Image (cartoon, grey):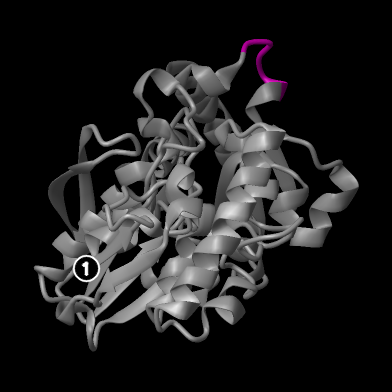
């Protein structure tokens, strides 16, 4: 067979379409469309950037899924899961105490807790990993990781010595801290996978920037910021001498301050997008491909600042890159800033809101996949 008629190989490496399709479902729909166009061979690599879908992406790449029941953001039991390959465990906020797990979708900015995430980390430790990747996107809480820390061996007491639940409402009531880090965490490499660069407190901190997305009013934002400032001070007095400097570190404000608590425990922070590209062996998988197709729910200014499609494009070398999105807010003249040759947006194919209709999203992705395939051949 001549090169002119040899099958083209396409690497499909998308993030999820939030609220609509998982990264795996996006990839499957695009691949169906591409294959229907003719001689196209598809390699699927569902991706994540440390947000929701991180465990699913790891499982799709060969990690084993382990189910665990943990308290959700308001304490109700939720069926969560972690991914483990014998060395590295991936634990995510989104499937343990994320916004999507709030009962009836009711936002509870002061009462949501990160305890479930801590219990999932505790479960991961029972598998004896060498490394735990802490995927911090999608949190419902702004508790500075107080809930997570209660699951990992610490107790937070009020002025009368009573134990406090870990949530944003109780941050300002913490008078003292007792307990110590679980011995099982000693020697385990903790890695925070996040592309959030906000500090814990202040005008660019977790409450001010992300609190409103979680339902926080202006008064709630002020209360949470004051509570976190107080929480840092108590931790410093309790023996965490570097608490204040850690609170000011870029990324401490990720996941409502869970990033702060993780760093306080010695976790290192890495770019979520790049870390997952390494973890899922993107650089090897891209070799031999004629085209890379990536995507996410929205292509916009945030994408340019290092979200997954931009990271995929940056690491794809000279091969052409196409992005697919639910919507694109970037004008065509800016696509080149990410080395992307074309952006296909589902919103250009329908007047309906595909973000709330998984069936429609998949149908449009199959159509777009076919168009990409026909243009490729």
Q: Nearer the viewer, residue 318 or 186?
A: 186
Residue 62 lies in quadrant: bottom left
Per the image, is 349 magenta?
yes
Q: Nearer the viewer, residue 94 or 300?
A: 94
Quarter placement of the C terminus? top right
Residues in magenta? 348-352
Q: Position of residue 227 (x, y in %)?
A: 56, 53
Q: Which residue is mark 1?
A: 153
Q: Is residue 62 visible?
A: no
Q: Is residue 126 left or right of residue 43?
A: left
For image coordinates 42% across by 43% down, the residue present is: 23
* Outermost residue, top side: 351
Per the image, is 126 magenta?
no
Q: Secondary structure at mark 1?
A: loop
Main SS of residues in magenta:
loop
Q: Is residue 90 left or right of residue 65?
A: right
Residue 145 lies in quadrant: bottom left
For image coordinates 13% across by 47% down, the residue present is: 67
């Amino acid at each position: 067979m001549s090169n002119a008629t040899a099958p083209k190989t396409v690497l499909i490496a998308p993030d999820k379409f939030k609220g609509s399709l998982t990264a795996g479902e996006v990839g499957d729909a695009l691949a169906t469309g591409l294959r229907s166009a003719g001689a196209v061979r598809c390699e699927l690599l569902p991706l994540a950037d440390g947000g929701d879908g991180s465990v699913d992406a790891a499982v799709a790449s060969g990690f084993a899924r382990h189910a665990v029941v943990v308290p959700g953001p308001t304490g109700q039991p939720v069926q969560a899961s972690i991914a483990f390959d014998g060395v590295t465990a991936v634990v995510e906020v989104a499937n343990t105490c994320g916004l999507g797990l709030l009962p009836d979708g009711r936002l509870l900015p002061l009462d949501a807790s990160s305890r479930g995430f801590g219990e999932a980390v505790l479960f991961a430790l029972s598998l004896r990993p060498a490394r735990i990747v802490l995927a911090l996107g999608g949190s419902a809480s702004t508790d500075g990781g107080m809930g997570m820390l209660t699951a990992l061996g610490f107790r937070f007491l009020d002025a009368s010595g009573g134990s406090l639940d870990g949530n944003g409402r109780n941050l300002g009531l913490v008078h003292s801290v007792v307990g110590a880090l679980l011995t099982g965490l000693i020697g385990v490499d903790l890695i925070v996978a996040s592309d959030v660069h906000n500090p814990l407190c202040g005008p660019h901190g977790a409450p001010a920037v992300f609190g409103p997305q979680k339902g926080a009013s202006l008064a709630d934002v002020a209360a949470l910021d004051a509570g976190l400032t107080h929480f840092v001070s108590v931790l410093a007095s309790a023996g965490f001498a570097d608490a204040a400097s850690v609170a000011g570190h870029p990324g401490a404000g990720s996941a409502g301050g869970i990033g702060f608590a993780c760093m306080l425990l010695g976790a290192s922070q890495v770019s979520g997008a790049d870390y997952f590209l390494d973890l899922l062996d993107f650089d090897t998988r891209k070799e031999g491909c004629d085209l890379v197709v990536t995507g996410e729910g929205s292509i916009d200014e945030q994408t340019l600042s290092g979200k997954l499609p931009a990271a995929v494009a940056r690491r794809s070398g000279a091969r052409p890159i196409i992005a697919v999105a639910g919507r694109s807010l970037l004008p065509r003249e800016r696509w080149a800033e990410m080395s992307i040759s074309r952006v296909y947006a589902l919103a250009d194919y329908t007047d309906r809101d595909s973000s709330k209709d998984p069936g429609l999203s998949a149908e449009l992705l199959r159509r777009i996949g076919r168009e990409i395939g026909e243009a490729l051949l």
